[in-house]
Amino acid sequence: MANKKVLAIDLGASSGRGILGSFDGKTIKLEEIHRFSNDPVMTVGGFFWDTYRLLFEIKTAILKSAEFGGCDTLGIDTWGVDYGYLDKTGALLSVPYHYRDERTADIQPYVFEKFAPFEEIYNVTGLQSMNFNTIYQMAADLRDRPWVVENAEKMLFTPDLLGYLLTGKMQTEYTIASTGAVLDAAKRTYADGLLAKFGIKKSLFCDIVEPGTMLGGLLPFVEEETGNTGVKVVKVASHDTASAVLSVPAVGEDFLYISSGTWSLMGIESKTPLITEASLKYQFTNEGGVDGTYRILKNIMGLWLEQESRRQWTREGTKYSFDELSKMALESKPLQCLVNPDDDSFQTAGNMPKRIREYCRKTGQHVPETVGEVVRCIFESLALKYRWVAEKLEEMTGKTYPYINIVGGGTKEEMLSKFAADASHKTVVAGPVEATALGNIAMQLIASGEISDIREARRIIRDSFDVKEYQPDETTASAWDEAYERFCALLGE
């Protein structure tokens, strides 16, 4: 059969890519055809996304695809929560805010007092407390610039907005909407009662569609600009983590996954949401998945700690490669000191090695002085946090998960994958690296009938890309168990 070619537009917080997927009926091959920076802008009025620049880059990727034989469909995935308002003519009312804009810094106390306590919001939406969730951003809009909301006809989440600007058609894809605390998790529809309490008019929202829905063809002027005709836009699992989880090459239904990068997003797939006193206490979130599933997960501060430490060492005059950092960590003494990766002191940019040392000093531990000691502390702490999340999920579900699938860029850090196996006493399967783009491409192939379902997609991904397996080292089990007791004490348990 002739190769089916589809284009994944994968947008991250700092960069974006156009990746062409080629499917011959048995395996998928990937080729990056366009890469660009995503540069949010701080200006008068706040911190904003450069949405029209992103649209230009997407058109450029479509244009470049012609050099590789073109594409039949394209799909867009992005980060969650952010959105834009459209007026009655269909034009953007204002440039979309970045989720790190400071207008939501004080919004939660305001919301909890004026509209609803967090427990009520959680019991409906199933989302952990983050002040940049869409519902809090919209509350800030209503408080600080009500005239924008009053003049808005519709709102669209980022991937839906970009799809609309390409096709002229408005739809809201389920997985991206599920990130914003505007949905009733159990019903998979808008949380009408909660939105009414906030004073958010339901008419702003578009119809919800599931991943795999065909949005439609490109607008005529977009076809002319890009030199491509007949390309269809598919609503993929447009939240990037949902696409990444789709690509997990799992066998069976019960597995733990980690989408590993700047953040480590760790969880399970479930046919039902998990909204209980325990999930509220432990701050687990329920986001939408593909094929009627939920992603019950925990947001963990992942490789950010190493990335920010590396930036600090570069500022101090030494630019280490990640391989050099891993080698120095491996040569350092194990399990000397630990940190809670999600401590507030590690959330913002700055001198991360200094903050880690201050944390260890404050908690009465060995203070890591060398570069290798700092990196080893980060990796061992992340591995123990993975164990903590795994144990809480097993406690809440009553199931035992024998292995952990790690996907995404973090799989390049082999030491972290090995530590995860040792700390959790579970087999770790690492790969593929290009998880999000693969999930995007797989959903396009399902939508066009080339692949039958999610299970077949995962089998094809297993056949197409190498994964690496890590077994726990029994000789170090007791040392990791002792370290885990110390780690739990740092968490207040």
Image (cartoon, rainbow, N blue to C red):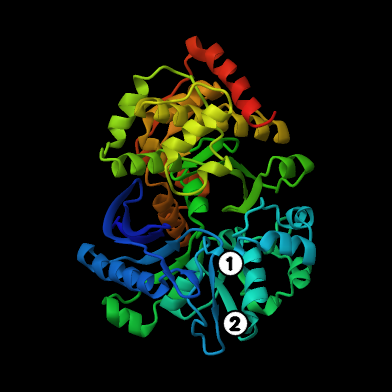
Q: Nearer the viewer, residue 492 or 436?
A: 492
Q: Which of 90 and 484 is in front in this view?
A: 484
Q: What element carries label 1?
A: helix
Residue 404 in view, yes or no: no
Residue 493's quadrant in the figure?
A: top right
Give neighbour class at mark 2: few <14, some 14-19, many 20+ (Cα, 10 Å). Answer: some
- Check disc 1 and give the amino acid type: Arg
Measured as percent of width and height from the top left, residue 94 is found at 50, 80
Residue at 46% across / 69% down in the picture? 48
Q: Which of 415 and 42 is in front in this view?
A: 42
Vertical placement of residue 127 versus 384, above or below: below
Foreground label between 1 and 2: 1
Measured as percent of width and height from the top left, residue 195 is found at 73, 69
Q: Any mark on residue 148, and which? A: 2
Q: What element carries label 2?
A: helix
Residue 349 in view, yes or no: yes
> Where does label 1 land, which residue?
103
Vertical placement of residue 271 versus 14, above or below: above
Q: How far apart are marks 1 and 2 (CA)?
A: 15 Å
- Check disc 2 and give the amino acid type: Val
